[in-house]
Image (spheres, rainbow, N blue to C red):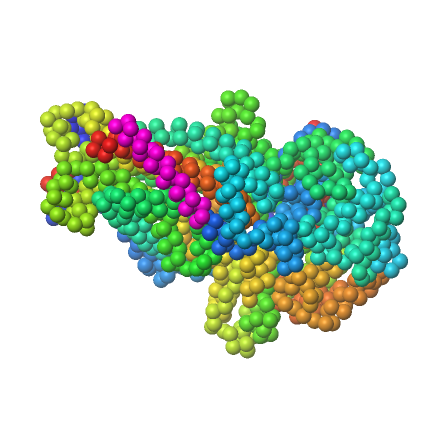
Amino acid sequence: MKSGVLNLVMKRLAVAVVTLLIVLFAVFFATSMLPGDTASILLGQAATPEAVAGLREAMHLNDPAILRFVLWLVGLLHGDLGTSYANQMPVAALIGGRLVNTMKLAAITTLLSVPLALTLGITAAMLRGSVYDRTVTVFSIGVISVPEFMVATLAVLLFAVYLKWLPALSSVNEAHSLTDLVRIYAMPVITLTFVISAQMIRMTRAAVIETLSTPYVEMALLKGASRSRMVLRHALPNALGPIVNAVALSLSYLVGGVIIVETIFNYPGIAKLMVDAVATRDLPLIQSCAMIFCLGYLFLITAADIVAIMSNPRLR
Amino acid sequence: MTMARATTSRRSFLGYSYSLVGVVAALVILAWMLVAILAPYIIPHSIGDIVDDDYFGPMRQGLWLGSDYLGRDMLSRVLMGARYTVGISLAAVFIACFSGVVLGMTAAVTGGWLDTCLSRFLDAMNSIPSKLFGLVVVAAVGSSIPALILTLAVIYTPGAYRFARALAVNINTMDFMTVARVRGENTAYLIGSEILPNIIRPVLADFGLRFVFIVLLLSGLSFLGLGLQPPLADWGALVRENIGGLPFAAPAVIIPSLAIASLTISVNLLIDNLPQKIRDRDA
Amino acid sequence: MTDKITNWTSADDAMVENAIRRGASRRELLKMLLAGGAAVAAGSVVLGRATQAVAATPVSGGNLKAAGWSSSTADTLDPAKASLSTDYVRCCSLYNRLTFLDKDGKTQMELAESFDSKDAKTWTVKLRKGVTFHDGKDLTADDVVYSLKRHLDKAVGSKVAKIAAQMTGFKSVDKSTVEITLADPNADLPTILALHHFMIVQDGTTDFSKGNGTGAFVLQTFEPGVRSVVTKNKNYWKSGKPYLDSFEFIAISDDSARVNALLSGDINFAASINPRAMKLVSGQQGFELLQSTSGNYTDLNIRLDMDPGSKADFVAGMKYLVNREQIVKSALRGLGEIGNDQPVSPANIYHNADLKPKAFDPDKAKFHFQKAGLLGQSIPVVASDAATSSIDMAVIIQAAGADIGMKLDVQRVPADGYWDNYWLKAPIHFGNINPRPTPDILFSLLYASNAPWNESQYKSEKFDKLLVEARGSLDQAKRKEIYNQMQTMVSEEAGTIIPAYISNVDALSSKVKGLEANPLGGMMGYAMAEYLWLEA
């Protein structure tokens, strides 16, 4: 069985490389379809045809885009992410600190939201139809149906402007102590937890209910087995596949989707970097960000697939 | 805890049992649909007309839901917004879930290269940032409501696929599937009659969530220029354009938020409380 | 903006104070007070209090944290490439210009001591002595020549290449004298060189990441798209300045978040706040607002060389259909001045005040549309978030059109790529023009027959001739007369509808002192860092 999993991981790794290439090519293709290039966008309203041509020449943007893409890929093999078109800095330097910020925020949010969501989902499933269950549903859907920017703005108004408990901006470079850290991360983490928990809660609840209604669990229940024992011993392992998939899908949001939180709390992460890169058609930066998003996503779903397979003896 | 299934009042009608919560949820959805259909005939003001010199005006006679950031009538804008939020989101979520679930079940039942190819392809699609995708659609085909619906559907298909496939893979290992295969049933039968009934509830729960996501993304895409053109606005866009009224607790930002919440919560509560056939094995 | 005020409150005090700061005349102030329902006697009391608040002695020390509204990985410390307000603010703190514009729009000397010319074609610039760069090197004529000449190099990608192109000869006569030769006479050269892009860098600089200038602050940290921190230049040549020990600049693109960060005390200065948030700030103790009208405008451009703009009646009809008052009142919430379809704003000394804006007249509009045979047809109008308030303006014009049976189809297009894709190209579209210091720059860039950004494709030989005539003349009165005539021509003949000049409002903590309005834009024409001080 162990070698089976190892085999699977190896196979998935190979496939992941192919997926990554497809994504990079798709992103490259998408970027080239957008109107304008770095030279004309940097010049903005000052872009006359001659000025654009001159700058394009100076920035070496006259080579065919596909050639630049391939060269970037070759550089990537040597671990070189290239140089940003927009400000001539190495892409690795631009991404570095911001990737760490994104990872920190994602990690803290995961640690808070996953246990919370799973607990709520499982207990709601066990008490299906109860007032508790309905409260959880109404609350979780209610929370995500409020747009993210509104949750964040409300939090700032309440905790920063009126109560003055927390800073309105999450300035990472001002964190000197644990208290600072908590104060800085509190609002972004709560906002993101609101956003991603609902999917995990709802899917966990649905998957557990589904397994609870399979004939063998019903049989065991009729025979007098305890309900909580059934859930933990039988229903949960069988529902694990769908649950981890829902968790993976939710968490993938934390890699590239936190643009609103980054904007409102002025938290420098890579979602904003990607937006900037697209706005300036900064190909090396776009590709590098896309690669990070894709790797993050592939890691999450591959982990989910492996857990799903491990949890179902018949799939091993 | 044995058999401690806490149930609220369920009634029965024509051999179906239904719960009060489900009925209320269904009524709310119906009411919004009715509003969506009738909106053009019942709005008191044209949605583009500035009728108030003030902005973020309070609720008062004549302007029952106050005014927005330009001084336009919020009641009219919310009523018309129902059309787009309900219509476009429902269309998009149906397409996304239908294609995602059918593909997911097919992949699970068939397995092999089809499964691998489909899974990787949809994974790849899911890792393209939706903003970039939206911009490309605008650049390529311009802005129209069908383009908006399809874009939303495409963005949310991979997620539906992944979840449905994960569910279906588990069912696929059950003995009754082997039996059906031995009987020589074709794929369409297997997914329609054997898999779907066993995963329908989680799939519906997923549908409900995806509906919420689509309602919210809709306004984001409108702001990219894909979709609704001013002065039309869906509810999400109403919240967004009036967000400056939040510190003043302006109805212009609160009412559309409540409208979104009432619709999305109702859809999800209805899914949780669908009428069940009495004597269904879960009843 | 004052017709809603019925009770005099502390917020109104703030408004008057601000009006004084932006240099409002006594007549204007009285008008404001009367509109507010205050008796004249009460008015003078308020004025006294406000004047007192403005006059105070600067104190040194402290750290100012300010937030602008736009920032990206393309942020640069190269003045030639500066494109966002963020870049201007940073460059202003690190570098100096030869000249600058004061709060009245008059040109003042900065690194230059004098500008002299007999024919407005060959200019001699005397440089100030004893000015050093942050790295200790003295400022010389070579630095100035290098700084100006590089705008002509296409590889630099200068934002003002088109304006710089008229400078054809540069010579460093001696260590502190530069001679600039122009292709054609231009009396405005000293004012042109007050543009932010013409800041003086050190000779030979190609890497601008150090921000090595002669300015009031020395660069400490610069992360593009994130933040910058600059610290006091102890050897600054302006004695006593700057007052601040350090100045941190970030950008918060979300309007509400920027105001909230100010109110929560995270920052002391929030630039360019949404007019709808003014109520929030002015109602609070400890915060102030400063309004400046600089000549920034969003215009509706109807290309005269394409359908439907080629029909003169359509353009005439549109000019009547634009409800300028409503645009100022509803879209700009009073923070703007009604425009008269020409680019020289009231903040400019050459503004033609006798030229009245077209009154909103749907009947006349209908008449013209009918004559053009376009009534009832659907006409696309392209708007985007890229051009400030253009979507709101479009909606207002659309609603007015609907009332007379003119169907305007507003198309909101992405801000991304707008200037490349739609601006100047679509038959009817919106543009947004930043303030420029002289009518000559505005007209040459936007209205001359060969103008690079001729938004409506306006062509007039007479106009071109007048432009050259005014440019070469050193006679102020004559120029004023010619520019008045040109403003009338643009207003009547061009297809650019300029409904309003948009004001900018900066919000700040009351502890921040020394802020004044400036015709080059908000944040004192982006140069505030060296003038502000923090109350102890």
**Residue drawn 55% across the image and 39% down it:** A91
**Residue drawn 12% across the image and 47% down it:** B184
Disc tally is 0
Q: Position of residue B193 (x, y in %)?
A: 16, 47
A300 horizontally vs A68: left or right: left
Q: Position of residue C13 (x, y in %)?
A: 66, 42
Residue C475, can we see it? yes
In front of the other: C12 or A195: A195
In front of the other: B125 or C239: B125
**Residue drawn 19% across the image and 37% down it:** B173
In front of the other: C5 or A314: A314
Q: Which residues are magenta?
A: A1-26
Query: Where on the picture, by quarter, is residue B176?
Result: top left
Residue B254, can we see it? no
Rendered-image quadrant of the C terminus of chain B: top left
B86 horizontally vs A32: left or right: left
Question: Is residue C232 one of those drawn in magenta?
Answer: no
C11 horizontally vs B88: left or right: right
**Residue drawn 79% across the image and 64% down it:** C470
Which secondary structure dominates the residues rendered in magenta?
helix
Q: Position of residue C34 (x, y in %)?
A: 67, 51
Compared to residue A275, the image places residue C446 above or below, namely below
In front of the other: C457 or C149: C149
Q: Position of residue B135 (x, y in %)?
A: 47, 52
